[in-house]
Image (tube, coloured by chain):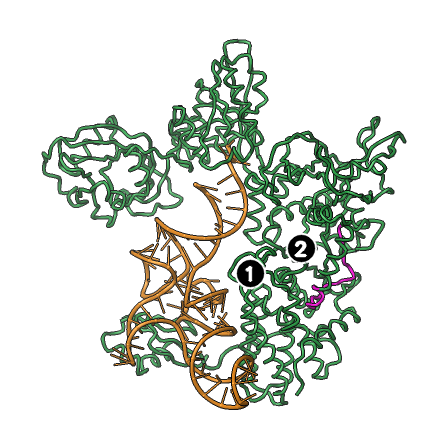
Amino acid sequence: MKEYDHKKLEKKWQTIWEKKRIYHAQNNSQKPKYYSLIEFPYPSGEGLHVGHPRPYIGMDIISRKRRLQGFNVLYPIGWDAFGLPTENYAIKTGQDPRMVTKENTDTFKRQIKSLGISFDWSREINTTDPEYYKWTQWIFLQFFKKGLAYKAKMMINWCSKDKIGLANEEVVNGCCERCGTSVEKKEKEQWMLAITKYADRLYKDLDDVNYLPQIKLGQRNWIGRSEGAEIDFKIICGSPTFTEVVKVFTTRVDTIFGATYLVLAPEHELLEKLKSQISNWDEASRYIVVNKKASDLERTVENKEKTGVELKSIKAINPASGEEIPVWIAGYVLATYGTGAIMAVPAHDKRDFEFAKKYNLPIRQVVAPVSRSSILGQMIHEGEPFRNREAVMCIVKHWKKNEYLCQEWKDFSGVRTFISGGIEPGEDIVTTGRREIKEESGYTHAKFIKQLNGFSYIEFYHQRKKVNMRARFRYLYYEFEDGEKEEISKVENNQHIIVWKKPKEIVDFLTISEKERIWKLFNSQEEIFTGIGYMVNSGKFDGMDSEKAKKEIIEFVKGKEKTTFKLRDWIFSRQRYWGEPIPIIHCQKCGMVSVPEKDLPVELPKVKNYQPTDSGESPLANIAKWVNTTCPKCGGKAKRETDTMPNWAGSSWYYLRYVDPTNDKVFADHKNLKYWTPVDWYNGGNEHTTLHLLYSRFWHKFLFDLKLVPTNEPYMKRTSHGMILGEGGVKMSKSLGNVINPDDIVKIYGADTLRLYEMFMGPFNQSVAWSTESIIGVRRFIEKVWRLQFKIKKKDNKEMKRILNKTIKKVSEDIEKMHFNTAISAMMILATEMEKAENISTNDYQKFLQILSPFAPHIVEELWNMLGEKKSINLSNWPEWDANLIIDEKIKIVVQVNGKVRATIFINANEGEEEIKIKALENQSIVKHLASGVPKKFIYIKNRLINIVI
RNA sequence: GGGCGAGUGGCGGAAUUGGCAUACGCGUUAGUUUUAGGAACUAAUGUCGCAAGACUUGGGGGUUCGAGUCCCCCCUCGCCCACCA
């Protein structure tokens, strides 16, 4: 009996696979193509830890399955090797980053190769290779030529420790993402990429790709598209000739009648022009200075109170109501979003509400909430018209006790309200309330105290009148003076009963959906309503649906529809050494000139010292020999750009280079691009699903517009994997000393065991804690599979065929959903069954090996070979399952009595419901449980259960 | 503060989407084997109970013949965003 020796066997097959080029993708194949992609790693100095291979193994399983399914598969890998950690290491040790990178990639490569992942290593790329970054530079120049790469002076986020400008997305809670130092503001010229030009397409084209929903959502939130309107507010002041206008962006034009003041961002450019008209300019300018100094961190501190200054002696005109409203400046309005100015609607916006409360500015409700069908328990009849009704709802206090009058309806059971009723023509609301109170409760001496602030609408179907009603309610407060009472009419008496409730009980008791808001209003805890509803206090728009009224209101105030984005242009320069030099030459005469294509790549020169300069320029600025050059246009003296590109650059297009990695004429041959792109399935980490994905979609769309790539989107499908955490669920890190090196696991248990374990430990898309203790389980499974070879006999085993086919189906489907853990569990069950069985047929065993092969390729190849197969199992096929063989002959049916399982019976596939019923009733255990009652109802769910209700 | 997601044995986790809760694996216990230890194999293993049986998916309510799964409220944890009008 041959022992399972993972060390010998894994090495042997890895060598053979490499020699036979089994995983090489063919550019000119008649087979359908499949392009599977993982995020190429950053080769850090720490080497691989067990978390790295998880996504590689996952996509390896997909890729191997596709090969067996007859696809020509491209599954490549490379190195995203530019970046800060290597540079910092170089600074510290005085080593050349090129050498550091070489050492690190060598280690990573050896480690990854030991896992038997079916990468096509002949297409390996490296972003730091001049032959690669030549094309990164070339693409940059295309952006430059189209005006999408430009230089702009701007306040940047500056990290004083790393001496580097940071993109907004690299600032986490006001601190540098890498080192945690608090971020400062610094003015600097920066290269920018105009990603905002593509914002709308980046947003809308998400409809056409198959990304996980949360990934799409992340992209959408980051782009932050919102549809609204731009509206002009006139500014008036003492001087009659003065005509200035403030543009305001809002998504809620429908609330414009409630705009009771206007706010400008402290940086708003109009302030310069208004300066002379503002009587308290001193105070205002002081506020502006203080606000400018405050870092982003200070401006966003939690619970920070909003501050602002009113600009005295000027006013704005609300274009809807014609009212004069005050103008303020306040830090809570951002200069960089929308127009840098807002119309404040404190009744319907939380921030405005807080501000208005603090500075005592008027609050006016203009949208009333609507609740449907809650009052009389009847669903409204869709599509039928509404009858409008004005109504009151009365909160009435007891004459002695601290209790309030409520009623419970008899004819619509379970409906509980305050006293309410419709206003008769000509009647004033106070009279209506008093009349309703008397009619419904009999009490006569109700004294009107006040009307609550606000309206709400209730829509319901009126059963007696057989019509949809829309009632607009006002809330009135009364107190009884005494308990004097009249007889109530029979009709009323039949409809409801009167109940007194204590304040604490009210909200629980009532069934109307606006109850909480009403009760808060009554207790004068003002509530703001930010939803949509029906308009009130809005002139001719009163009663309209606020969502539907938007268009008309924009017209009415002569505004225009406008879409804005949160997305900002991408700050593209870094003042560092270890990145792609930006291929631009600055000439005194000609300005900024592209490096001619023939001179690409602009290679990084060797330097003695990698330290950034104190002025914030990149270390490249110190190398006069490299910096000083001649202008390609006029031949005069010129200087090279010394900024380099960010990490994101090389990874924005790398998947295109795999298609044709050695081409020195173009970044990739168009024929190859046409065959291979788009990427069919891209899996990567959650941390890259917004930025990297967005940036690379942007580059791809740009290249598509230049007709350089054949598709509009780079990736058809995107999924993400969860992290592998250290034992105990904490992050694996060198400092915690809990890093597991895959080398050790491969040595002790073998690559197949490691692969299986990483896929078995938990759901692929969730983080899981590593547990070395648990690995033994999958190792036992593999050894079981090894032992099975000694049970092979010629004889067929019918029952085995059924289980096998079920497993093939399960594994096939689970792989597509990345449910690798349950696929493995199904194969474990199959292996146990096979071991229990008297014999296994060669054919069944081979099919098992085929479905196991993507998970544990080495052992399976060995067993396949031992069965006498001459060709690799990789060149065989993915087995189909036979649907007929999966059907059970005897079906187990659960018999329940009142929902509790009392017995199980077996039926044949062809038995009907009646026969099953009889069988169930004959069962001894069931007979016993039926003794206490008579069967009232039978519920039969096909092939599953029967429930007898007694 | 907002958005998204999660909460199931001692542990990692299953549950064809409303139909036998706890598959599979680890661990634990017993047995076989072994000089011993380990490994391997076999069996048992949610809780209470001698048992029949009862109870059990963070807590509370609801819908249903039937709820881990659907609805409402609350608690806890994780991730992302954070004054975006």
Q: Position of residue A470 (x, y in %)?
A: 33, 38
Residue segment shown in magenta:
A111-127
Chain of the residue under the numbered disc 1 shown in the image: A
Circle 1 residues within 10 Å: few <14, some 14–19, many ≥20: many
Q: Position of residue A425 (x, y in %)?
A: 25, 28
- Dot 2 amino acid type: Glu
Residue at image coords 46%, 35% = A548
Circle 2 residues within 10 Å: few <14, some 14–19, many ≥20: many
Mark carried by residue A39: 2
Residue at image coords 86%, 35% = A629
State yes or no: residue A344 in magenta.
no
Chain of the residue under the numbered disc 2 shown in the image: A
Is residue A411 placed above or below A342 in the rendered structure? below
**Chain identifier for the orange-coloured part of the image:** B
Along the viewing direction, whichever of B26 and A450 lies nearer the viewer = B26
Is residue A184 placed above or below A106 in the rendered structure? above
Mark carried by residue A402: none
**Disc 1 target residue:** A726
Along the viewing direction, whichever of A766 and A422 lies nearer the viewer = A766
Q: Secondary structure at mark 2?
A: loop
Q: Position of residue A541 (x, y in %)?
A: 42, 28
Viewport quadrant of the N terminus of chain A: bottom right
Residue at image coords 62%, 86% = A841
State yes or no: residue A115 in magenta.
yes
Residue A396 as seen in the image, left or right of residue A260: left
Residue at image coords 52%, 24% = A264
Viewport quadrant of the C terminus of chain A: bottom left
**Chain identifier for the green-coloured part of the image:** A
Image quarter for residue A321? top left
Residue A503 as seen in the image, left or right of residue A53: left
Mark 2 vs mark 1, CA separation in Å: 22 Å
Q: Are marks 2 and 1 on the same chain?
A: yes
